[in-house]
C-alpha cells in the first residue's frame, strides 16, 4: 500500500474533527473512537514544563490531522502526516 492509499484509509476510518483530551492524553474522533495515546513522558518528565509539553504535542497532532482532513496547506500537512504515520 502506498502513502496515498494509507492516508485515504486513515481518513476514511476517522470521523472529523478529532480532539485532544489532556486528562487522558489521548486523541479522539468525533464519534468517540480513540485515535491514539500521546506517550512521551519518559524523556519529557525531565524537561521544563513537562505536562504542558505533552499536552502541546497532543494538541499539535490533533490540529494537524484536522487541518490535513480539510486540505489546508496540503503539501506541508501531507509531509507532516507522513512523518507522524511512519
Image (cartoon, rainbow, N blue to C red):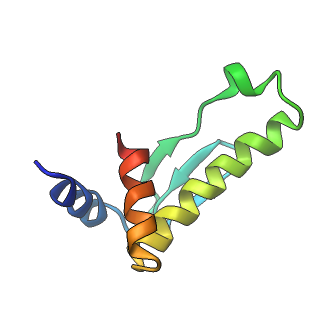
Count of picture labels:
0
40 to the left or right of 84:
right
Where residue 57 appears, as percent x and y from the top left, is: 65, 47
Residue at 59 percent of width and 32 percent of height:
39
User: In which image quadrant can residue 60 be found?
Assistant: bottom right
Q: Nearer the viewer, residue 76 or 81?
A: 76
Residue at x 83% of width, y 28% of height:
47
Up/down of 86 relative to 44, above or below: below
Q: Quadrant of residue 10?
A: bottom left
Q: Horizontal and vertical percent for residue 35?
A: 44, 50
**Residue 35 vertical placement versus 45 (above, below):** below
Residue shown at the point (35%, 39%) measured from the top left: 86
Residue 23: x and y in percent read 72, 45
Going 46% across and 80% down the picture, which residue do you hit? 72
Residue at the outermost right position: 48
Tell whether 44 sits left or right of 78: right
Q: Position of 23 compared to 74: left or right?
A: right
**Position in image of residue 5 (x %, y %):** 15, 58
Viewer-side residue, 2 vs 26:
2
Q: Nearer the viewer, residue 80 or 40?
A: 80
Q: Is residue 59 visible?
A: yes
Residue 17, visible in the rendered structure: no
Left or right of residue 49: residue 78 = left
Residue placed furthest toward the left: 1
Amino acid at each position: 500500500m502506498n502513502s496515498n492509499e494509507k492516508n485515504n484509509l486513515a481518513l476514511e476510518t476517522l470521523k472529523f474533527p478529532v480532539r485532544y483530551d489532556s486528562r487522558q492524553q489521548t486523541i479522539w474522533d468525533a464519534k468517540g473512537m480513540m485515535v491514539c495515546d500521546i506517550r512521551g513522558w519518559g524523556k519529557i518528565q525531565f524537561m521544563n514544563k513537562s505536562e504542558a509539553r505533552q499536552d502541546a504535542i497532543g494538541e499539535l497532532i490533533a490540529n494537524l490531522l484536522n487541518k490535513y482532513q480539510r486540505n489546508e496547506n496540503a503539501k506541508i500537512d501531507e509531509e507532516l502526516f507522513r512523518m507522524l504515520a511512519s
